[in-house]
Image (cartoon, rainbow, N blue to C red):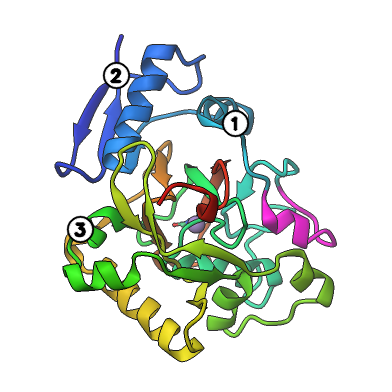
């Protein structure tokens, strides 16, 4: 059986059916999925039944796997999922209990509510994120996605010219700081120093130009901090206007893949006394955006 790709809009978000992701993936299906990601940037599979190893095996078809920054930083706490390649995007602690309101992992996890793109604070950032839903609440907890290619295309030519060669500084501590989460040790701070990333990049799989912005982006190199920050705020506001945004309402068994190189995403609120158990595997980009063709 071959896969079916059903676009939700002409260029953004498609549902893919006719493939069991727990089974070994054939080349034809792999390539069709990659083509769909290159075109639609977000793809959704329903009704999957994956354990962590199967989710990882599927992801490995699309590139080397990024290791979780979370586990590297929180070596002192018990993790529910041991593998550094599987990020725990749940509201559960190492014993499977709902996280306490003030717990460190919960405060870190809340930063997913800010518009961001995964691991832009690493020199070699994230490429494809694959998030799989084990348990979802009855209401709320959607994930929203913003199409940064369409947002770029819609900018006035003058703005495009002005931002063309700008470089932003990204830091995980900047996004955490927006939520007043700042209690990190000097070792933690040193483990993830700020990195430069292009503000405008070309998506290799589609050839389309795209913004590359996120809650991690703090300011623009060579510009007063305030000016750069305001520019980033304006661009994020522009890119998250309704025509560029799609909300995914989760069902158990959904696997959603998004391309971090040309989208932003954020989690929406839900009753956090209920369980929401999602797990993410992310492939690594090939290099820093500064080393990639603009
Ligand atoms: C992520 C993320 C959003 C969500 O997994 O990287 O930001 O809705 N998730 O859980
Ligand atoms: Mn994320």
Q: Which residues are magenta?
A: 68-80
Earlier residue among tags 3 and 2: 2
Earlier residue among tags 1 and 2: 2
Near mark 3 (Cα within 10 A), the count class, few <14, some 14-19 or many ≥20, is some
Q: Position of residue 106 (x, y in %)?
A: 62, 68
User: Who is closer to the viewer here, 132 or 206?
Assistant: 206
The residue most toward the top is 1
Q: Mark 1 and 2 residues: CB-CB less than 8 Å, in contact? A: no
Secondary structure character of the magenta stretch overall: loop
Q: Residue at x 71, y 49 (%)?
A: 80
Quarter of the image where the N terminus is located: top left
From mark 1 to mark 2, how far is it between C-alphas? Answer: 20 Å
From mark 1 to mark 3, how far is it between C-alphas? Answer: 34 Å
Residue 153 is marked as 3
Earlier residue among tags 1 and 3: 1
The answer to whether residue 216 shows anywhere in this view is: no
Q: Mark 3 and 2 residues: CB-CB less than 8 Å, in contact? A: no
Residue 120 is marked as none
- The local secondary structure at tag 2 comes to loop
Task: Tally the marks.
Answer: 3
Q: Position of residue 127 (x, y in %)?
A: 49, 44
Q: Position of residue 196 (x, y in %)?
A: 56, 65
Q: Position of residue 237 (x, y in %)?
A: 29, 75
- Residue underneath mark 2: 3
The answer to whether residue 64 shows anywhere in this view is: yes
- The local secondary structure at tag 3 comes to helix
Residue 56 is marked as 1
């Amino acid at each position: 059986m071959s896969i079916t790709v059903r676009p939700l809009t002409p260029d953004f978000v498609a549902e893919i059916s006719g493939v069991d992701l727990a089974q070994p993936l054939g080349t034809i299906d792999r390539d069709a999925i990659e083509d769909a990601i290159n075109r639609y940037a977000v793809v959704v599979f329903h009704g999957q039944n994956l354990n962590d190893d199967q989710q990882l095996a599927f992801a490995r078809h699309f590139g080397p796997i990024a290791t979780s920054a979370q586990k590297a930083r929180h070596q002192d706490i018990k993790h529910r999922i041991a593998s550094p390649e599987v990020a725990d995007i749940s509201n559960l602690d190492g014993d499977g209990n709902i996280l306490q309101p003030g717990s460190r992992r919960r405060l870190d996890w809340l930063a997913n509510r800010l518009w961001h793109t995964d691991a832009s604070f690493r020199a070699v950032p994230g490429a494809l994120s694959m998030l799989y839903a084990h348990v979802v609440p009855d209401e709320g907890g959607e994930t929203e996605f913003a199409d940064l290619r369409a947002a770029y295309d819609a900018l006035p030519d003058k703005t495009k010219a002005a931002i063309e060669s700008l470089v932003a500084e990204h830091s995980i501590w900047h996004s955490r700081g927006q939520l007043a989460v700042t209690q990190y040790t000097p070792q933690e701070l040193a483990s993830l120093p700020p990195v430069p990333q292009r503000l405008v990049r070309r998506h290799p799989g589609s050839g389309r130009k795209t913004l590359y912005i996120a809650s991690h982006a703090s300011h623009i190199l060579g510009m007063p901090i305030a000016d750069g920050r305001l520019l980033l705020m304006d661009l994020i506001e522009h890119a998250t206007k309704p025509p560029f945004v799609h909300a995914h309402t989760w069902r158990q068994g959904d696997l959603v893949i998004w391309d971090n190189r040309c989208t932003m995403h954020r989690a929406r609120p839900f009753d956090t006394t209920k369980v929401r158990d999602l797990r993410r595997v992310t492939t690594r980009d090939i290099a820093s955006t500064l080393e990639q063709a603009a």
